[in-house]
Image (tube, rainbow, N blue to C red):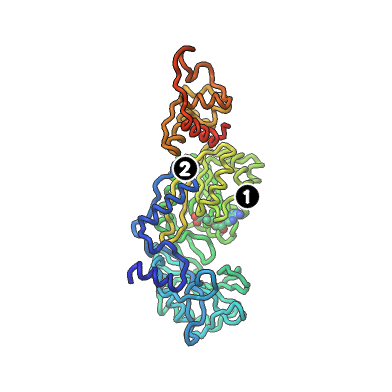
Amino acid sequence: MDTQEYTCRLKEKGCGGCPLLGIPYEEQLKKKQKDVKKLLGKFGKIQPILGMENPWHYRNKAISTFAFGPGRQLISGIYAKGSHYVLPVETCLLHHPELDAAVKAVRKAARLCKYKPYDEDRKTGLIRHTLVRHSLLTDEILVVLVTAEPSLPGAKTFVKELRKSCPKVATVIQNINPRSTSAVLGFQEKILYGKGYITDSLCGVRFRISGSSFYQINPIQTEVLYRTAIDAAGLTGNETVLDAYCGVGTIGLAAAAHAKSVLGIEKNASAVRCAVQNAKDNQIQNAKFINGDATEVILKMAARGERADVVFLDPPRAGSTPEFLGAVSRMNPEKIVYISCNPETQKRDLETLRKTGWKAKKIVPVDLFPGTEHVETVVLLSKLNTKQHIEVELNLDELDLTAAESKATYEEIREYVLEHTGLKVSHLYIAQVKQKYGIIERENYNKPKSENSRQPKCPPEKEAAITEALKFFGMI
Ligand SMILES: C[S@@+](CC[C@H](N)C(=O)[O-])C[C@H]1O[C@@H](n2cnc3c(N)ncnc32)[C@H](O)[C@@H]1O
């Protein structure tokens, strides 16, 4: 079956998982580039999106929900769009093929053990979902069987049959979720076989992956994402680094070799335990982790006058909080690297950061989710008024400026206008518009050499463009 046919069949069935699958990959990338530009273009130039060479079978995690199929046979698959009707899924173009093989083996073992699927409406049956993870490093598979109650009769037989059909299964976990909820996992777990985790590697660091902790689902592009973020930070080995919303410590631990120290903050206690263990397993001694809400932790750090040179933040889809961003700003880092899986909330947070003088220096979209509408973005931010920027980025002509002028250089205004309108504007025109808004120029700067000299007047179209730029930089 080719991609087109596959997509048509899924659409017929009502599968809403991957709305872009029927579109050629180049077109998908163009669309995402455009979407990011629309949302974040006002903060700076958007670098070309970093896509995949082979955008298929990239997922390292699958979730399959159990139900009764024809003849009351146990089936598993995904919910049809907008409903709780289960569509059987045997293969998926986005899953690593080992995942489909493992889910098939789970179904076979569950049928042999005569497990009944859980019925949400009647509150009957036992097994709800299976969550399966694959490691590219070791080729091992982790299987989680989610049940509605703690008792799992014949658990040993289930594991034996599962491993017989799929010997790559290295660990099996029972997760108990008795709640009426759309969340897949519950809070209680039992290890039925193996160590309860598998090991994967990213950017040369090995990570333990459990059933419940957050781990990026596209390992190939995650390396691209992390390298982009770490490169953007320009670490020299002397920096103190904060890795907020750190999950199992992936970004911080990948950056640790290039920094003086790393402090990770994460709300999920089991992810923090994994992060501490990951540091040990990799003999990384300059990384520590705090279990807590990122906003609460950082507010306390800022109040104690603590600081960091570089802050990485990679919040969930809901984004960060104004309180977190305010506290980061008070800690006065040299750089913030904001990694996001939701450019809409990132846009909101960038607006908040801009109010305290932060400016986007680099914006790079990374396609972690081919076939879907989702996209990751890495944004590097720094403050224009830090010592480093005065030394490196302002030229001498522009050092003697009034407070309003100091917000953006003539070059930055010129670049902004060119990028947003395609118009070229001279320093003289910028000076004229600034004067119009009462932004006082220092003596003789960009003024005509004699009172009588004929000065070209800024045309209205360019004046409007410069006015927009002055607004953007908060100067008027
Ligand atoms: C998008 S994930 C990023 C994890 C990690 N940086 C990575 O790349 O694997 C967001 C993480 O934030 C954590 N989280 C969510 N809300 C939080 C909060 N209020 N404080 C701290 N961590 C939080 C989640 O548990 C999750 O691990």
Q: Earlier in the sequence, mark 1 or mark 2?
A: 2
At a point 50% along the width and 54% down the height, the residue shown is 341
Three-letter amino acid code at the position of disc 2: Ala
Query: For the residue labelled by badge 1, is the local secondary structure a helix, a strand or a loop?
Result: helix
Quarter of the image with the C terminus is top right
Does residue 332 lie above or below 146 as drawn? above
At label 2, counting other C-alpha atoms closer than 10 Å, the crowd grade (few under 14, some 14-19, many 20 or more) is many
Quarter of the image with the N terminus is bottom left
- Kindly tell me whether mark 1's CB lies below 8 Å from ligand 1: yes
- Residue indicated by mark 1: 295
The answer to whether one can see residue 288 in this image is: no
Name the residue at the front extreme: 460
Three-letter amino acid code at the position of disc 1: Thr
At a point 41% along the width and 37% down the height, the residue shown is 422
Q: Quadrant of ligand 1?
A: bottom right
Specify the label residue 92 is tagged with. none
- Residue indicated by mark 2: 233
Does residue 138 lie above or below 432 as drawn? below
Name the residue at the bottom extreme: 71
In the rendered view, does 331 fall on the left or right side of 80? right
> Residue 14: horizontal and vertical position, in percent?
47, 71
> Residue 402: horizontal and vertical position, in percent?
57, 24
- Kindly tell me whether mark 2's CB lies below 8 Å from ligand 1: no
Q: CA distance from mark 1 to mark 2?
A: 22 Å
Nearest the viewer among 106 and 444 is: 444
The answer to whether one can see residue 99 in this image is: yes
Residue 202 location, quadrant: bottom left
Does residue 90 lie above or below 293 as drawn? below
Query: For the residue labelled by badge 2, is the local secondary structure a helix, a strand or a loop?
Result: helix
Q: Are marks 1 and 2 in contact (CB under 8 Å)?
A: no
At a point 50% along the width and 48% down the height, the residue shown is 39
> Residue 390: horizontal and vertical position, in percent?
50, 29
